[in-house]
Amino acid sequence: MKNWLAAAILALTAAPALPHGEKPQGSKAMDYLKAEETPFGRAADPRKAKRTVRVEMNDQMRFVPAELTVRRGEIVRFVPVNKGQVMHEMVLGTMDELKKHAEMMRKHPGMEHDEPHMAHVAPGKSGEMGWQFTQAGDFYYGCLIPGHFEAGMIGKVTVK
Ligand SMILES: [Cu+2]
């Protein structure tokens, strides 16, 4: 089982966590040196990014842009902006992991979790996420709020 999945399951049983989106801004203070390597890269300090990518999320269940190209090793500061009236989230991963995660969200709709590769964003707000893509290939970002991913709320990152 992938570590993030284990962490998400642990979060299910843990003491009351903040619901999606109620985490105060800037609360992702973490030790980036200890960031765990995943098949799609690792968490990175957004302040070290040379590039900021603003990604809009809307109630038509789309990300704008829905396609990005980054260089391998590049640190990207993502700024997901929620232009809609409902909660959205930007979750990075492989297609396989996003599908598994979406399935888990359907089974446990009240699931509360937070990881460095995801940002939950309330309507009208924006988030921030630093990520370093350490592997070449095709990766994805999805909104895993039940129904959104299924409606096509997904984007693609090509790492060269
Ligand atoms: Cu959404």
Image (cartoon, rainbow, N blue to C red):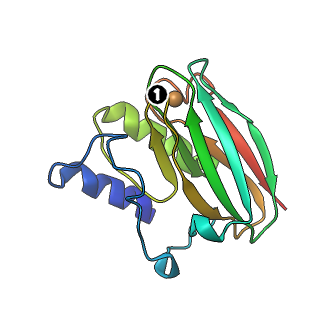
Relative placement, left or right, of 103 versus 157 is left
Q: Residue at x 44, y 77 (%)?
A: 31
State the quadrant of the N terminus.
bottom left
Name the spot of residue 140 as percent of width and height, x first.
66, 46
Residue ranking furthest to the left: 15
Screen quadrant of the C terminus = bottom right
Residue annotated with mark 1: 123
Q: Is residue 58 above or below residue 19?
A: above
Residue 65 location, x and y as percent? Answer: 74, 36
Q: Position of residue 38 (x, y in %)?
A: 56, 67
Q: Position of residue 81 (x, y in %)?
A: 58, 37
Please state if 94 lies on the left or on the right of 111 as rendered.
Answer: right
**Looking at the image, can residue 139 be seen?**
yes
Q: Is residue 154 left or right of residue 25?
A: right
Closer to the camera, 138 or 145?
Answer: 145
Judged from the image, the secondary structure of the residue bearing numbered disc 1 is: loop
Front one among 143 and 2: 143
Q: 98 and 114: which one is in front?
A: 114
The picture quadrant where one finds residue 58 is: top right
Q: Is residue 42 visible?
A: no
How dense is the environment of label 1, judged by Cα within 10 Å: few (below 14), some, or many (20 and up)? some
**Quarter of the image where one finds residue 14:** bottom left
Q: Residue at point 82% right, 64% down?
A: 71
For the point 54% across and 41% down, the residue is 99
Q: Does label 1 point to a residue whose CB lies under 8 Å from ligand 1?
A: no
Q: Report the front residue among 56 and 35.
A: 56
141 over 62 or under it: above or below: below
Q: Residue at x 56, y 73 (%)?
A: 37
> Quadrant location of residue 107?
top left
Kind of residue at badge 1: Pro
